[in-house]
Image (tube, rainbow, N blue to C red):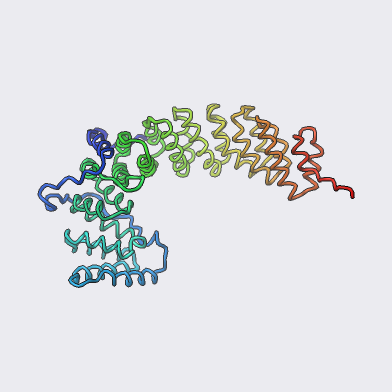
Amino acid sequence: MKVSPRASHTPISWFIALGIGLMVGRHGLPASPGGDGVETRSTSSEKPIGFRSGESGGSPQQKKRSNRKTSLTTLTAPGEDEQNRRMIELSDILNTSNRIERTRQMLSFIDQVDDGQMAEIIDGFRDAGWIDYNRGEYTMLISAWMDRAPFTAIAHLDKNESDGWTRKTAISAWAADNPEAAANAIQGLEDEGKVNDWVVGLIEGIARNDPEGALRTLKSLPGGDTKLQAIREILPEVVIRGADFAGDWIEQIDEPKLQRETAKRLAHSLARRDPESASDWISKISAVETRRDASEVVSEVYAQEDLDGAKLWAENLPQDTMTEAAEGVAKYLARKDPAEAALWLQKLGNDPDLDGARFRFLQEAGRSDPKTALENVSTLSQAKDQERYYRDILGRWRKQDQNAAVAWAVANSETLPPKVLKSVLPKEKKRK
């Protein structure tokens, strides 16, 4: 099913402006007409759900309480009674063990905080070291501030917050609701690192409702780490829309290298979600190299879930893709039954491009059934690869069962490379 984007006809002039702004550099934020009162947006449909309180820290509750109490002492200063009271109240909320109750109290707390207090509350949250333990609650504060006074929030975070995750979280919430306003607000803003998290957050936010619009935004950006990171961030929004949508979406990426890299990431997620649908998606990819790379990833996952289905799928792919898809099947089939895997690979033909699948087979079978593996080393198309696998498999087998390894080498001495045979046979003791 193809999903139609909500804003498929949105003018792209602001995409171009964003790209220009990124190359020009820091320009400062556009002033909000009429101050924060005019700047405040109407309540959006976005609700602070999916809180992740305590998920990233993983420390015991007692440690969290101790950290907060210690941190609060650094926040207190003469004339800061109101701020200190707010932070103590927030500390008590964060110490609430029941997540639902903690969320209710956070919402009530946010409603009581004036817009002018948000900067101090957020800075205090960060300085107290609470973010790693309570990212969900921190996200609620950032989202509320962005909803009330986005320009003020962005200006403050740009000046005072070096954490890229905070910047990305802040702008993505706004971009999901009003992408054009969000893009204009961050025009010219830069990060100190290789990745501009303002831009990544913008594209991530757009993708929530319009993955195709997010892709159009990406196309307007220069190549680099920011573009690659943004691609990674929006892939979940593509995956949840299914393989058909993903197929149409990936075809819109014009840069061959970027398309291949993106398809490999997309292939893994789609296959985990539904291997059969992902395998159908592979056959519809028009670019051969992209199809080959993605098929290798899907086959690995598909063979784990349904080995017989993966075998049939690989056998019916075009030759230029089948050779790559065979790799994952060969690996898991060799683990199950090395002899069957050897016969299956022989059935696929003598194409040198099947060497990748043969490598996978030999790596697996060489551990569990060295005799079967050694009997199939000669199917490799390159003599140097044959010598390497003869040496590796026989060397490992000799450590486990020297008599059996030496006996096989002697019986097949005419076909073994001389150097390999010499390395396996016991060295003669020198006479005194």
**Please, is residue 262 above or below residue 155 in the view?**
above
Q: Position of residue 338 (x, y in %)?
A: 67, 41
Give the position of the N terminus as an image quadrant.
top left
Q: Is residue 216 visible?
A: yes
Q: Residue at x 80, y 47 (%)?
A: 403
Q: Is residue 4 visible?
A: no
Q: Residue at x 33, y 51 (%)?
A: 164
Q: Residue at x 49, y 34 (%)?
A: 293
Q: Residue furthest right?
A: 432
**Please, is residue 106 above or below residue 384 in the view?**
below
**Please, is residue 170 above or below residue 281 in the view?**
below
**Please, is residue 358 above or below residue 122 in the view?**
above
Q: Residue furthest front?
A: 432
Q: Position of residue 248 (x, y in %)?
A: 38, 32
Q: In this orientation, which residue lies closer to the viewer: 125 or 93? A: 125
Q: Is residue 339 left or right of residue 195?
A: right
- Which image quadrant is residue 374 in? top right
- Which image quadrant is residue 121 in? bottom left
Q: Residue at x 32, y 47 (%)?
A: 197
Q: Position of residue 364 (x, y in %)?
A: 64, 43
Q: Position of residue 220 (x, y in %)?
A: 30, 34
Q: In this orientation, which residue lies closer to the viewer: 90 or 34? A: 34
Total tally of numbered discs in the picture: 0
Q: Residue furthest left?
A: 34
